[in-house]
Image (spheres, rainbow, N blue to C red):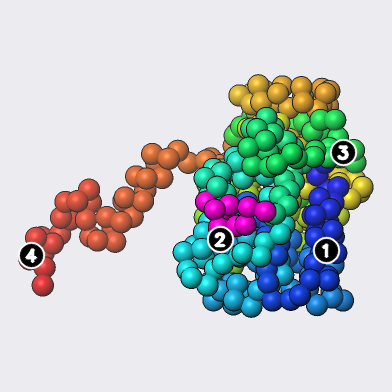
Amino acid sequence: MTGSGKTAAFLLPILHHLLEKPRGTTRALVITPTRELAAQILEELNQIATHTALTAASVYGGVGMGPQEHAFRRGADVLIATPGRLLDHFRQPYAKLPGIEYLVLDEADRMLDMGFLPDIRRVLKHLPTKRQTLFFSATMPPPIATLTREMLHDPVTINRERKSTPAIGITQAIYPVRQDLKSALFLHLLAQGVMKEALVFTRTKHRANRLQLQLVKAGIKAERIHGNRSQSQRTEALAGFKSGKYRVLVATDIAARGIDIAALGHVVNFDVPQSPDDYIHRVGRTARAETTGDAFTFIAPDEESQLRDIERVVGKRLPRVTLPDFDYNAKPEGKLEIPLAERLAAMRAQRGRGKGLTHGKPTKPDARRPRR
């Protein structure tokens, strides 16, 4: 289950086997779906290998390829990579990995969800066929089980749980609320001191941006993390949240897998996740390594069906919470989500103003003069 130590479960034995091997050849490759997870695994590996001569490097997009090329050339013992950037390197003559003995696919189900399967197949063509391959994930849906039979030879399955469920230390609660009052409810909980800090998941990048802006306007130190942010912005946001610089981190599911935040007290599903597996991974950011934490889910009337799916998987009806001092009939102060058509129209208007044009028509007489 989430927080049970899967990263150490593959790092410790691999590093143990590599201790006696000669340096200068990359013998282990770990593939992850996100940059944040790759960086986190590298950090954990470096902690474990502090008093050894073992070396490791991360390979992911959004940063320069120079240091990563150096890691290929010097033969770092372990490479931790995202599929896309790894394939970028494989186009170059220096990126050869003939010495790979161990291949780990971490968060294998998420890589399938993100459409990485074709990339994984291309990566495998660059690796030795004789190797040990390991899949790790908190959930193992049927497509991944099928993939194991296709990509693994006579695999052994180790399953610590009979089925995927949230960690035991997580207290789960459902907050029924209108869609347009979710922001007000979240600000109310923060103002009441119910949450010291919170990792908040939204359905889209746009909603993450809008919610973070509303929090900042209300005086809450908050940042957001999603796929449209640069790597430096994503790194700073996560580091700032871990250090306490930000009280709230608003995220899409990019932060739902594997990210370890010590003693995180609260996870909030601002939007109900699309699948029960996503729910399990999201709430698993709290109550890690046998600690405790709270997971709140805001549920609008049109999200009831997803909630029923989640409750079927967790095997119980989750408790509903209604706050006596919150006005559930209040008029919302502003829209959280601006419809896509409105956003596109605003962008076109902005570009038109920048060019002195509206809908492609001249707005000033001199706009008809020939360009010089």
Q: Are marks 1 and 2 in contact (CB under 8 Å)?
A: no
Q: What residue type is disc 4 on?
A: Arg
| Residue at figure coordinates x 67%, y 53% from the top left | 130
Secondary structure at numbered mark 1? helix
Which residue occupies 7% across, 65% down? 369
As for residue 346 lying within the magenta part, the answer is: no
Q: At numbered mark 4, what does the secondary structure look like: helix, strand or loop? A: loop
Amino acid, disc 2: Leu
**Residue, disc 4:** 369
In front of the other: label 4 or label 3?
3
The residue that disc 1 covers is 17
Mark 4 or mark 3: whose residue is earlier in sequence: 3
Distance from disc 1 to disc 2, alpha carbons, whole Å, reads 24 Å
Q: Is residue 101 left or right of residue 50?
A: left
Using the image, tell me which numbered label, if any, was put on residue 163. none
Is residue 113 placed above or below 88 in the rendered structure? above
Q: Quadrant of residue 79?
A: bottom right
Would you call the spot at circle 4 few (<14 residues within 10 Å), some (14-19), or many (20 or more)? few
Instruction: List x then y, in percent, for residue 329.
Output: 66, 28
* Span shown in magenta: 122-130
Q: Which residue is mark 3?
A: 160
